[in-house]
Every structure is written in structure tokens, then in C-alpha cells.
Image (cartoon, rainbow, N blue to C red):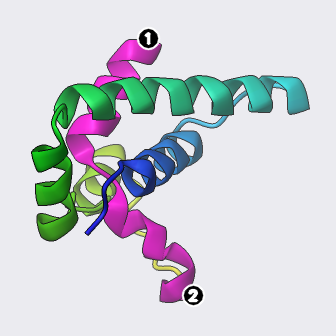
Amino acid sequence: MHTDLSPVIAATAQWLLRAYPASGGALAGALCEVQARQAVTVAARLRYPTPMDVALLGVAGPGGAARLDWITGADGATPADPDADAWRTWVDEVVASWAACLLT
């Protein structure tokens, strides 16, 4: 059982970075990564405020990125190595949408 939200934060931030890549150079990419991680952290702490909520998330799981991929139109590509995209199972749709709102 996870006692922290780090898998959800890392996976959801990674999904946001891939869905909405930074335009510009390396500095813009680094700034985008920091801002995405901060927004996802705030959204995750708001969505799962108590240790019991985090424990239930560890048992039930966040839901994955399948619906988000379908909404954004990125569901057509099948990965060559399914193990390489195992992080996508830890993406939380609500956290991603709240983080996107915070970023706008």
C-alpha cells in the first residue's frame, strides 16, 4: 500500500507533459516540467487530502490514462512494448484535469 502520492503525481505529470509538450527549447521544457509537477502535486493533495484517501487509492488504483487518451485523440497508437508504458496505469483523470485548470 502506498503511503504517499508520488506514483500518481509522477505518472499524471508525465501524461500532461506528453499530451501538451512545451514549445521552445530546453529551458521551456524544463519550466513546463516543473510547472506540471507542481500543478499535479497541488491537485493530487486536494483530491486525496487524508491518509485514508491515499490508502484507498493504493488499493483501488487511479484508473489509468485510457479515457484521457480517448478524449485527446491519442488512443490510436498502440505501444510496441507494453511494459514501457506501465506508468500510464497510475494516471488519475481528475488530477490531470484539475492540474490542467491550475496551469491555465
**Residue 65 coordinates in the image, percent (x, y):** 32, 58
Circles 1 and 2: CB atoms closer than 8 Å: no
Q: Residues within 10 Å of mark 2 (few under 14, many from 20)?
A: few
As displayed, is residue 78 above or below residue 99? below
For residue 50, side relative to residue 84 (left or right): left
Query: Which residue is at a point 49% across and 40% down the rendered structure image?
Result: 16
- The question of residue 99 being in magenta is answered with yes
Residue highlighted by disc 2: 80
Q: Residues within 10 Å of mark 1 (few under 14, many from 20)?
A: few
Q: Amino acid at mark 2?
A: Ala
Q: Main secondary structure of the magenta part?
A: helix
Query: Which residue is at a point 30% across and 35% down the rendered structure image?
Result: 44
Which structural element holds mark 1?
Answer: loop
Residue highlighted by disc 1: 104
Query: Which residue is at a point 78% across and 31% down the rendered structure image?
Result: 30
Work out whether residue 81 or residue 91 is closer to the camera in this orientation and state it. Answer: 91
| Magenta span | 81-104
Closer mark to the observer between disc 1 and disc 2: 1
Position of the N terminus by quadrant: bottom left
Q: Give the mark nearest the N terminus, 1 or 2.
A: 2
Q: Is residue 97 visible?
A: yes
